[in-house]
Image (cartoon, grey):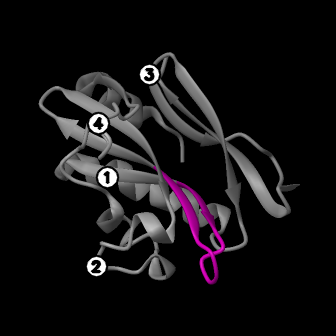
Amino acid sequence: MNKFNIEVISTKPEIIDGLLSYWGRIIIENFSEKFVMPVTDWSLDEYKQQWENALKRINTYNFSCLVVTVQNLKDNPLIETWNIYKEEKKIYFQNSLLIEETVEHKKVPIFKFNATNCYQFIDYPREQFTEEGEKISEWSMNADDFFSSIKMIKK
């Protein structure tokens, strides 16, 4: 059984929160979460291609991200990612919500967010506490289990 997976679980799009969207799911060992993938700014194929590229990237780099929600890029962007960090023999995952106010310090404006520059929006190195000192929620798994799982993910 795969200990990690990311997939589209809808067979066809539906209107969710006023936007044409698909449902997706991420599984990290015993944790599973559904997410909404609007297809007004990104197509379903763009999400899948980004996931494939992100999973290839983590082989070479110590951080990557899986983009799961992109909406309102032109006027009020809201982007959700699952950031992936490779540290020694562990893989860490942190869910991240990107809005204009939280990424003002980045070199790339959020309005120009795309599958190529999405990695520039990841805080690296991995932060474990917020500015207020609160623990950041994260999930982790053995790196060998993760890399075995991503080899089995179907395109």
Distance, label 1 to label 3, CA atoms, is 18 Å
Q: Nearer the viewer, mark 2 or mark 1?
A: 2
Residue that protrudes farthest toward the left in the picture: 88
Q: Position of residue 8 (x, y in %)?
A: 66, 45
Compared with 18, 3 (above or below) is: above
Identified at 34% across, 79% down, the residue is: 108
Q: Secondary structure at mark 3?
A: loop
Q: Is residue 1 left or right of residue 39?
A: left
- Residue where numbered disc 3 is placed: 3
Residue contact at pointers 2 and 1, CB within 8 angstroms: no
Query: What segment carries the magenta color?
Result: 68-81
Q: Is residue 72 found inside the magenta-colored segment of the image?
A: yes
Residue assigned mark 1: 64
Can you say whether 10 is above or below 41 in the image?
above
Q: Which residue is mark 2?
A: 107
93 vs 41: above or below = above
Q: Of tags 3 and 4, which is closer to the observer?
A: 4
Determine contact: label 4, label 1, CB under 8 Å. no
Residue tagged 4: 133
Amino acid identity at mark 4: Gly
Dot placed on the residue nearer the N-terminal end, 4 or 2 = 2
